[in-house]
Image (cartoon, grey):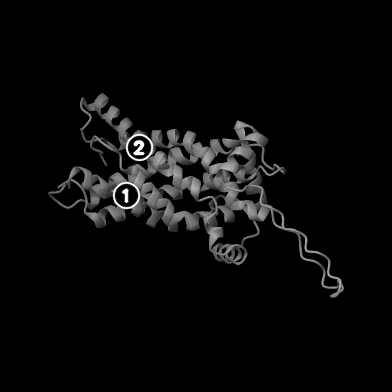
């Protein structure tokens, strides 16, 4: 997958991807951080019963506002590294890259995005999980006299009123390090998953390109993008679990001392299967999200630069 020079259209694709996948992402984060949930539908029913539809979109505004920048940086870093590698190895930037070149460029893309996404991920995870952490106390006992019912206790206000308030609160209470909590797990997650992501997309596009054409048709892009997303999240899920737990672990009762301690403690308490919590959801979410991301990316490229043949 090579980008022609000019405006990088990854931003619109990223926004569409977030809009499609965010409800499933909320369910995924809650399953990964709350052992009480026995499965996907248990979490969905519990969330809907307590917060109706809005509960699935907690913390959405910040990812939507930042996804254009993050997607552009990710895709831009990938293409920039690929151009430099091709120029260094083959003497020109438009040479066909080897699969090793694509893998290294994808790896670099994952490394760079961590510095932008870590604060956003912290705020997103805290907002998605705060209902479980800030739940009001139980109702008054039924034995209370009907004629002299005590006044209702006001519900506890949520700790975080929104993404910006969450970021400010985390920075004030935990320092700047709090905004990069779980960044080590995020680094491992994104570097390997983005290497898989771009490599698998490039390979699938080659396979799905009709004879005599330089790129696949719309159906081929949809299939390649969706499959690339699924493969990337299959690689990413173990570190995604650790990342979510580390980032949610900052409400005054800190359980984990770091990445290794979180991984060992989680496996010891819940077994090795804990590292694959949310895998089904990640894969189900990844296919439509990355279909949308890549088909939007390619469609904007064709509209701005003209169709390729």
Visible residue check, residue 204: yes
Report x, y in % for residue 98. Answer: 27, 36
Marks 1 and 2 sit apart, C-alpha to C-alpha, by 18 Å
Which residue is pictured at 70% across the width and 57% down the height? 135
Report x, y in % for residue 88. Answer: 26, 24
Is residue 26 positioned above or below 110 on the image?
A: below
Q: Nearer the viewer, residue 259 or 249?
A: 249
- Camera-near label (1 vs 2) is 1
Q: Quadrant of residue 5?
A: top left
Horizontal side, residue 204 vs residue 264: left or right:
left
Q: Quadrant of residue 30?
A: bottom right
Q: Which mark is residue 76?
A: none
Q: Where, quadrant-wise, is the N terminus in this rendering?
A: top left
| Among numbered discs 1 and 2, the one appearing first in the sequence | 2
Horizontal side, residue 214 vs residue 30: left or right:
left
Q: Which mark is residue 294?
A: 1
Judged from the image, the secondary structure of the residue bearing numbered disc 2 is: helix
Q: Residues within 10 Å of mark 1 (few under 14, many from 20)?
A: many
Report x, y in % for residue 112. Answer: 43, 33
Q: Nearer the viewer, residue 157 or 253?
A: 157
The residue positioned farthest toward the left in the image shown? 212
- Residue pointed to by mark 2: 103
Judged from the image, the secondary structure of the residue bearing numbered disc 1 is: helix
Q: How many marks?
A: 2
């Amino acid at each position: 997958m090579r980008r022609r020079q000019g405006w990088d259209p990854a931003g619109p694709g990223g926004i569409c991807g977030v809009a499609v996948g965010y409800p499933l992402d909320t369910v995924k984060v809650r399953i990964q951080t709350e052992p009480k949930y026995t499965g996907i539908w248990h979490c969905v029913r519990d969330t809907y019963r307590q917060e109706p539809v809005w509960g699935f979109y907690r913390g959405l505004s910040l990812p939507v506002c930042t996804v254009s920048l993050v997607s552009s940086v990710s895709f831009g870093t990938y293409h920039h590294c690929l151009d430099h590698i091709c120029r260094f190895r083959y003497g020109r930037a438009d040479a066909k890259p080897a699969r090793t070149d694509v893998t290294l460029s994808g790896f670099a893309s994952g490394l760079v995005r961590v510095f932008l996404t870590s604060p956003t991920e912290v705020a997103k995870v805290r907002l998605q999980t705060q209902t479980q952490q800030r739940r009001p106390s139980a109702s008054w006992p039924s034995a209370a006299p009907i004629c002299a019912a005590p006044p209702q206790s006001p519900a506890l206000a949520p700790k975080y009123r929104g993404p910006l308030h969450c970021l400010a609160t985390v920075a004030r209470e935990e320092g700047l390090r709090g905004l990069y909590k779980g960044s080590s797990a995020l680094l491992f997650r994104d570097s390997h998953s983005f290497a898989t992501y771009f490599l698998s997309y490039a390979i699938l596009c080659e396979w799905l390109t009709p004879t005599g054409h330089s790129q696949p048709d719309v159906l081929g892009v949809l299939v390649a993008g969706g499959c690339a997303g699924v493969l990337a999240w299959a690689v990413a899920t173990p570190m995604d679990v650790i990342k979510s737990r580390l980032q949610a672990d900052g409400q005054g009762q800190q359980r984990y001392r770091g990445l290794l301690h979180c991984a060992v403690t989680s496996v010891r308490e819940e077994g090795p299967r804990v590292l694959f919590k949310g895998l089904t959801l990640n894969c189900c979410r990844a296919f439509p999200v990355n279909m949308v991301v890549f088909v939007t990316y390619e469609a904007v490229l064709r509209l701005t630069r003209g169709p390729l043949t």
